[in-house]
Image (cartoon, rainbow, N blue to C red):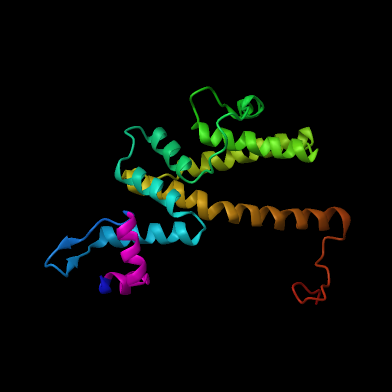
């Protein structure tokens, strides 16, 4: 176990906790006090740490691990299970009719999506409605067209050599790439704002973040 900790940078105490929680499988016993761990344990431990470090709860991480250990037969179902593992659960009674109408515009049909994922769209739309904010129609069209292009590019990149590789790609891509997409959106908005409302050049900042030299 000490060698596993050294090779992954995860403390022995954390490894023991993951073993107790069933996140990490037991090593092959060599004696009453020693177990042998292999590359599969190293890969699994790195997935666990990536998820937890990204803010995924232990319960959600368990769902990811369960998907890895017992993957659905169809690749599409595997994708849905992986997404569901890291998508917050919304109330069972949530009205998804507006969400269904919206995602129909990007090709959705009944049965295509995991209910939890569709529910998250419904929850987001309800949040917009409560705030009294409706994205302009042309902006929503751009959202849908852009997200469809992103999704198709990402699915083209899903590895097919094993269920574990596919789940790792989908789950870690969802958890770790979504913050990057949000950050890039904000950068792009500020660039577009500078182009529309300014002269397109960096603005001098007193905090030293950006300076016009």
Looking at the figure, which quarter contains the N terminus? bottom left
Q: In which quarter of the image is residue 199?
A: bottom right
Residue at 41% over, 33% down = 76
- 118 to the left or right of 201: left
Can you say whether 125 is above or below 98 in the image?
below
Principal SS element in the magenta part?
helix
Residue at 31% over, 53% down = 22
Could you tell me residue 52's position as x and y percent? 46, 59
Residue at 79% over, 36% down = 136
Can you say whether 93 is above or below 176 in the image?
above
Could you tell me residue 91's position as x and y percent? 57, 35
106, 48: nearer the viewer: 48
Q: In which quarter of the image is residue 193?
A: bottom right
Q: Residue 43: in sight, yes or no?
A: no
Q: Quadrant of residue 49?
A: bottom left
- Counting labels gives 0
Can you say whether 53 is above or below 127 in the image?
below
170, 11: nearer the viewer: 11
Could you tell me residue 3's position as x and y percent? 26, 73
- 203 to the left or right of 26: right
Region rendered in magenta: 4-21
Could you tell me residue 92's position as x and y percent? 55, 31
Give yes or no for residue 83 being in the magenta stretch: no
- 175 to the left or right of 192: left
Looking at the figure, which quarter contains the C terminus? bottom right
Can you say whether 22 is above or below 132 in the image?
below
Residue found at the far top of this picture: 110
Give yes or no for residue 19 being in the magenta stretch: yes
Residue found at the far left of this picture: 31
Residue at 45% over, 36% down = 80
Q: Residue 174: in sight, yes or no?
A: yes
- 26 to the left or right of 128: left
């Amino acid at each position: 176990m000490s060698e596993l900790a050294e090779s992954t940078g995860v403390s022995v105490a954390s490894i023991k906790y993951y073993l107790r929680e069933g996140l990490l499988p037991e090593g092959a016993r060599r004696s009453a006090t020693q177990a042998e761990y292999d590359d599969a344990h190293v890969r699994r431990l790195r997935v666990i740490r990536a998820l937890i470090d990204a803010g995924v709860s232990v319960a959600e991480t368990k769902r990811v691990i369960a998907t890895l250990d017992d993957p659905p037969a169809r690749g599409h179902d595997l994708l849905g299970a992986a997404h569901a593992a890291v998508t917050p659960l919304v109330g069972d009674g949530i009205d998804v009719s507006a969400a269904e109408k919206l995602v129909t515009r990007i090709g959705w049909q009944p049965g295509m999506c995991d209910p939890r994922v569709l529910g998250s769209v419904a929850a987001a739309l309800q949040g917009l409605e409560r705030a009294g904010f409706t994205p302009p129609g042309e902006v929503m069209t751009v959202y849908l067209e852009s997200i469809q292009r992103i999704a198709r590019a990402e699915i083209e990149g899903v590895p097919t050599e094993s269920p574990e590789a596919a789940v790792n790609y989908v789950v870690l891509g969802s958890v770790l790439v979504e913050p990057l997409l949000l950050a890039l959106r904000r950068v792009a908005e500020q660039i577009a704002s500078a182009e529309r409302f300014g002269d397109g050049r960096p603005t001098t900042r007193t905090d030293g973040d950006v300076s016009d030299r």
